[in-house]
Amino acid sequence: MKFLVGSPHSEGAAVSELASWASEQVGIAGDRFRGTVDACDINEPSADKRAITTRHLQIDPEPYRLPNGWIPQRVVAYGSTDPFIDNNPLVAAAASDFVAEILKTTNRLATTNEAVLTYLSSCRPRRGRRPTVVTKGLIDLDPGFGRWIQSLPDAEQLRVVAQPWSDTPTILHNKRDGGIVELPNSKFLRALTGGANDGWGVRERAAEEAEIIRSHLAENAAMFRRGPLRIASVGSGTGEPMMDAAAAALLQEFGTANSPMITVYGADLNPSSLAVAEHLASTRFTQLKFNSVRTNFLNKVDLRSFLSKARPHVVEMMGVAEYIPAEGARVETERRQRSLMRKVGLMSAEEFHATIYDSLTSGSIFVTGNMSTDSPEVDFVQHGLGWKGIIPRSTADYLRVLADAGIPGAAVELHVPNPGDSSGVYTMVSIKRL
């Protein structure tokens, strides 16, 4: 698209033309995806066959050594098999093609400096107030998908990603009467979140977390037979993926009859997410108690107080690190985010990780991770759905955060996606207090 220099009218017309083109491309891609979804039945395995199967390969830590000599103690490459994708290959292929077509459109718009065409700052549009033409086009494709986009990043909206099944509704907290509302998810939304690579990544992350917790239980079985497994979930949201992971780990390690209780302390700022967490804990799990703690966990004093009260064997934090800018940020957007957070007294990524590590008792672990810059669909998340402020990190950059936090490499077990055998979305770590 050529602009006539010095002619604002012509520039405005060119922007309008490009916006119309982008809107048309989103509509075409959406119609093509909808056609496949409408023509297919989504095959759903029985509830006992929906779990992801993970695979692991221990690899050499040396390639992950930082320039200052810091190196993780152990490195595991993980992969997985996803039941939704395996049972719905046509839907998964259509979802992948749909995301690819949207990325072609956003990539063309990214070179402009027009807010209607591309996100110019890290401020994410909330409730659809300031979406770009692409995000607006996505919202208009399907009522269920549109509602979902406009409700992001509320944790309640991640349930359909983790469980894209027809019998798993979105669960919301009614702020007016305090009740719980179940909302069915549209077939379009389930097909996209189930078939897209990032959806696989969310489910794979939960399965890998379960395996890390199971391994910790196996190493300390005698201790957990004497009392409950205590978990502190930082930025818990609804807590469901973590509760599922912990329950699955205990069942696998101890069996039904001998499984100990699980006591979860969930820290979050969103009271609605915590209300849903309490509902899920009481209705889905028989040996689990969820304790809500509404707090700003990026405040150092509040985080220390929360962890002191929880006295956890496991601290877990998934899907949060990519929202915490580092003091040593290498990207301008992240540096601006850190400047804003510094002004209001909130911790950097380095100080945050250090505070959690220093609060652990000997032998306890911190399970966390970060979305990778190598994630195949990260640009769709940032420029399509409008999550401009998310901070994906390379494995080296994430390890640098841990090293700068003062966490010794000997305490870190690194879990990296195995290329060709995983979604490639998340770098994960298990950090043991030495």
Image (cartoon, rainbow, N blue to C red):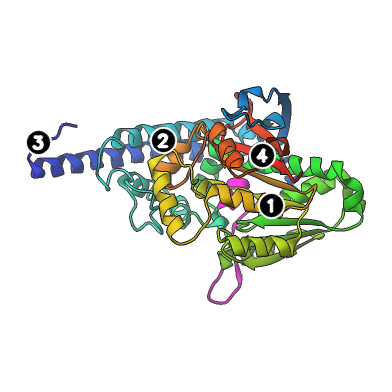
For the record, the magenta segment spans 158-180
The N terminus sits in image quarter? top left
SS of the residue under disc 2: helix
Image position, residue 330 (x, y; %):
44, 38
- Inter-mark Cα distance, 1 to 4: 16 Å
Camera-side residue of 80 and 371: 371
SS of the residue under disc 3: loop
- Inter-mark Cα distance, 2 to 3: 38 Å
Q: Which residue is mark 1?
A: 358
Q: As shown in the figure, which amino acid type bears the numbered disc 1?
A: Asp
Give the vertical position of 386 relative to 22 (above or below): below
Sequence-first tag of 3 and 4: 3
Residue at position x 53%, y 35% in the image: 397
Q: Given this view, does label 3 or label 1 mark the residue nearer the observer?
A: 1
Q: Given this view, does label 4 or label 2 mark the residue nearer the observer?
A: 4
Sequence-first tag of 4 and 2: 2
Sequence-first tag of 1 and 4: 1
Sequence-first tag of 3 and 1: 3
Was residue 173 drawn as part of the magenta stretch in this picture? yes
Label 1 CA crowd tier, 10 Å (few <14, some 14–19, many 20+): some
Q: Which residue is mark 4?
A: 429
Image position, residue 122 (x, y; %):
39, 49
Q: Which residue is mark 3?
A: 5
Q: Which residue is mark 2?
A: 32
- Inter-mark Cα distance, 3 to 4: 51 Å
Residue at position x 69%, y 60% in the image: 307
Q: As shown in the figure, which amino acid type bears the numbered disc 3?
A: Val
- Inter-mark Cα distance, 4 to 2: 39 Å
Was residue 19 drawn as part of the magenta stretch in this picture? no
